[in-house]
Image (spheres, rainbow, N blue to C red):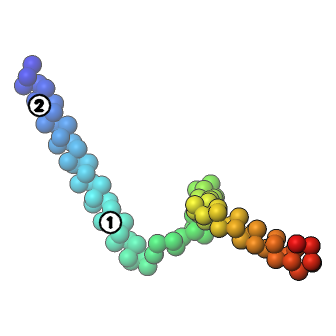
Amino acid sequence: MDNETEDNARNAVEEGKTAIEQATNLLNMMSALRGKLNIQDGAGQRYLEKIKPDMAQLKEAETEILSNYSGKPATKQKKRRNNMMSALHRHGRA
């Protein structure tokens, strides 16, 4: 029984190694294709919109969320308060 479990474990390890090798080969092929096609990071948004519009919308929503909620709400509130106070001062009500 020990020999069977050891053999199964070795087989699993070998399968894992081959899967990792295949993944690294695919990544290398993708980087080579990106180099040939002159694709840089951020390029291909229009292509994404044509091929996978849902994915393009998700990417746009993600960037919008990250830009709007980047952890700086206090500065927006402070800026708004300063604008309101300056408007009140302009009209002579403060």
Residue type for callout 2: Asp
Q: Residue at the location (46% across, 72% down)?
A: 41
Image coordinates for residue 29, horizontal then vertical, percent: 32, 66
Image coordinates for residue 89, horizontal then vertical, percent: 86, 77
Residue 61 visible? The answer is yes
Where is the C terminus found, in terms of image quarters?
A: bottom right
Q: Residue at the location (92% across, 78% down)?
A: 91
Instruction: For mark 2, give the secondary structure.
Output: helix
6 up-or-down from 86: above or below: above
> What residue is pinned by disc 2?
7
Residue 68 visible? The answer is no
Label annotation for residue 29: 1
Image coordinates for residue 40, horizontal then vertical, percent: 45, 75
- Residue situated in front as seen by the camera: 11 or 92: 92
- Residue situated in front as seen by the camera: 91 or 79: 91
Mark 2 neighbour class, 10 Å CA radius: few under 14, some 14 to 19, many 20 or more = few
53 up-or-down from 18: above or below: below
8 up-or-down from 61: above or below: above
Q: Residue at the location (23% across, 54% down)?
A: 21
